[in-house]
Image (tube, grey):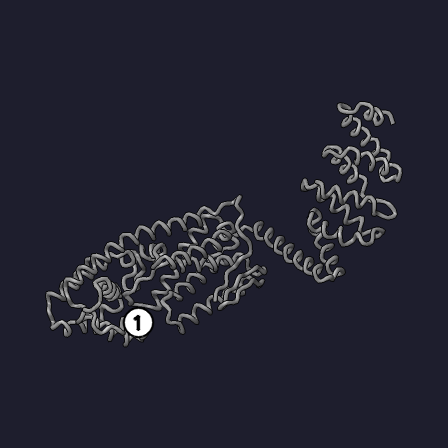
Amino acid sequence: MLILPMERTFDITRPPLVTWLLILFNCVIFVWTSIGDSRRLDQIAEAYSRLDILPQELPVYQSYLQQSGRFDSPLLTIKHPEQLSIEDQHQIAVAMLVDADYQPYASQHLPEFVDYDKPILASRSRILSDQVSGLSWNRFGFIPVQISALTVFSHQFLHGGLEHLLGNMIILLLVGMTVEQLLGSVNYLIFYLFSGAVGALFFGLLNWGSPSALVGASGAISGVMGMYVAAYGHRKIRFFYFIGIAFNYFRATALLILPVWIAKELFDLVFSDAPVAYAAHAGGMACGALLVWAGRNSWARVNQQIIENRDDEADYREQLQQALQAVTQADFVRAKKIFWRLAKLHPLSHRVFFQLYHLEKVCPDNKAFHLAASGLFRASLADGQFGVSEQAMLKEYWSLAQPHPQIPATLLSKILVKLLTSGQPALAEKMFAEAVSMKILSDVESNELRRDFARFFAHNNPETAKKYSNP
């Protein structure tokens, strides 16, 4: 089950540089450690093969796997490792030597299988101490049996494979960009690292004394998810879910999802055998949410302007979708009700008034038709969309309106000037003459428009300019 907050994509005018740098740094570290570890693993396999003890040690490791309940391991099916290819033998050797939990078992049971051959056992120990310990996850991973101030942070930049890296970085990209803009880059980076550290310590507490290394950014990224819902608090936001093969979006109160996330991680911690650090996820998530929630009025202030803008946009999108759906269902009464509600909240929304114009024009003598047309032309002028399609609707409105056009005089004056400057002087003159005859324009507005017409025609049509100069 996957539930991700998806309230809105990031605003490119406020680039989330820290998120991008974290992703870049994680990728660079992965490439660097992968190259070094690959070379070291080859050296480990070759050094181990020279000891020639694989046939003796594999039964010990198989016994350990069975006692650990790892019955699905393909190594349990191997009976004669000496008959395998050199490459397969190397892979088995590496699997045994890098399994930190196995080493105490091996030190206790392996001697009797190699007849207590001290030089061989000493050589094997040197491989562990000199080479296996030099692997990146053993040097910089978080190991509960040897906690250090370095590894509670350094483990966050290591990953166990390309799939592990990509999964974490995709989620960081989707969630981190929004959180960085909400909290600011400095707080975001500090909280990110601190959440990862707390997640590791919680993992260490539940796995006290374990020699296995924890690696990955998932604890810190879980902290970012906790920050996300804490920043939005009791507001409803959009979430994406993926369960089995089902996926979709839903809206829910942000903070209500936090206990669902944490409960899911704790459930998996108890009942899942997957090699995933669920404890680190739960610890990091709780830490990130607590940092933002506790400091929301002081040291962790959230950019409320971004949240409120996003709330407005989310509500606008949701209501617009409902209205359009009502149109497709031919429920025009409901559609108009929603569109007019949106028109009050968004008086310059070209899309809303475009829909209202077409819904209301079936009753050209209705006041709503005149209001919708006025709103459409006002929005068109405001956003610079007074083009061919808007001019066509203006002509249509002018011919349909009953008992006559009822566009407010100030708006009509702006429309006529716009027609003059957009290559439609004939239409502007026609509408001006009709508006004067229908007394839509006052004497003051008529005189002002005459001066505008005179100035416009002064250079290219002096005769027409005289007409407006001397009415």
Give the percent coordinates (x, y) of residue 288: 45, 58
Whether residue 72 is visible to the viewer of this picture, yes or no, is yes
Q: Residue at x 19, y 58 (%)?
A: 130
Q: Residue at x 74, y 36 (%)?
A: 418
Tell me the residue that label 1 is attached to.
Answer: 73
Q: Residues within 10 Å of mark 1 (few under 14, many from 20)?
A: few
Viewer-side residue, 336 vs 50: 50
Give the percent coordinates (x, y) of residue 298: 50, 52
Q: Is residue 366 above or below residue 433?
A: below
Residue 223's quadrant in the figure? bottom left
Q: Residue at x 43, y 51 (%)?
A: 189
126 horizontally vs 309: left or right: left
Viewer-side residue, 324 vs 187: 324
Secondary structure beneath dot 1 equals loop
Whether residue 381 is visible to the viewer of this picture, yes or no, is no
Residue 341's quadrant in the figure? bottom right
Give the percent coordinates (x, y) of residue 376: 73, 46
69 horizontally vs 239: left or right: left
Amino acid identity at mark 1: Ser
Q: Is residue 187 above or below residue 63?
A: above
Question: How many numbered marks, from 0 up?
Answer: 1
Give the percent coordinates (x, y) of residue 145: 28, 64
Q: Is residue 365 above or below residue 460?
A: below
